[in-house]
Amino acid sequence: MEWLVSLLTLTILEIVLGIDNIIFISILTEKLPAVERRKIQRLGLLLALGFRIILLLSISWLLGLTEALFTLGPWSPSTKDLVLLGGGLFLLAKTTSELHSKVNHLEHRGEHPDEAPSKKKSAKAGTWLIAQIVLIDMVFSFDSILTAIGLSDQIQVMIAAIIISMGVMLALADQIGQFIQKQPSLQILALSFLMLIGFMLLVEGFHFEVPKGYLYFALAFSTTVELLRQRFERKQPNS
């Protein structure tokens, strides 16, 4: 029964750790047509699944990435630390840009709705989106797998947990994306949360551990407060 407990624990953990991945992909693809958006969302999650399984099958190599490369004063960064730093900077830059666009409505300026984008431009945009998804998948995969390794030593259990959690996320990705897109205030909240994740990656790259439970509790609390606020406003009589 020990393997079953490990499987359930790891599956729930992978789903929780995958929420930020779903949010990031949903925000990146929100301006695409529905069919293309779903296709890229599924591709992004399948790539994340592939990255995680490959990393699990290369545990000895992965653990080697935690060895220090050089020393800079009190800081001795490893390959993992540099990946976290790069991913954190990318996530901060991308979410700041998206947040600025949302708040100032820059996405609607200079657009010509009567002009359909060319196939060449659409292909370039799709390629750039996939490249961003691949980059952030790599960063989140490192974090996810290293956490899983700390909780279990059975690779079959870890792979099963990752496959089950990805199946759940594939089933929920479209609904989560649609829900976020219909709620502008939740989009701002999601982007703020991703900025916090980016900052956390930077801090971890400098060897300051931040318990992830605090971050996800803050997200759950903030989302609950926002949903209660929206419900309260809907029930107010029209003035």
Image (spheres, rainbow, N blue to C red):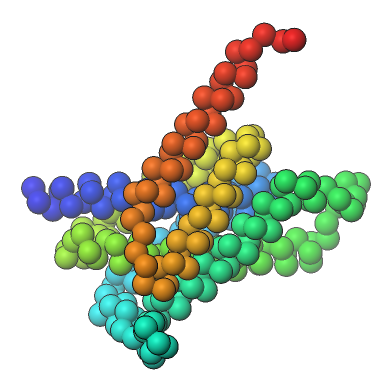
Query: Is the residue 139 above or below the residue 75 in the image?
Result: above
Looking at this view, name the residue that lies furthest to the front: 73
Where's residue 56, x and y in %?
29, 69
Q: Residue at x 54, y 31 (%)?
A: 226
Instruction: Judge left or right: residue 27 versus residue 47.
Output: right
Instruction: Judge left or right: residue 50 versus residue 177.
Output: left
Q: Residue at x 40, y 61 (%)?
A: 49
Q: Nearer the viewer, residue 132 or 186?
A: 186
Assign the C terminus to one quadrant of the image.
top right
- Which of the 4 quarters of the picture holds residue 160? bottom left
Q: Nearer the viewer, residue 239 or 57?
A: 239
User: Can the viewer see residue 159 in this picture?
Assistant: yes
Where's residue 147, x and y in %?
29, 62
How many labels sit on residues? 0
Where's residue 91, x and y in %?
56, 63
- Which of the 4 quarters of the picture holds residue 231? top right
Q: Residue at x 22, y 64 (%)?
A: 150
Where's residue 57, x and y in %?
28, 73
Q: Nearer the viewer, residue 208 or 30?
A: 208
Looking at this view, name the residue that lies furthest to the left: 1
Q: Residue at x 62, y 44 (%)?
A: 188
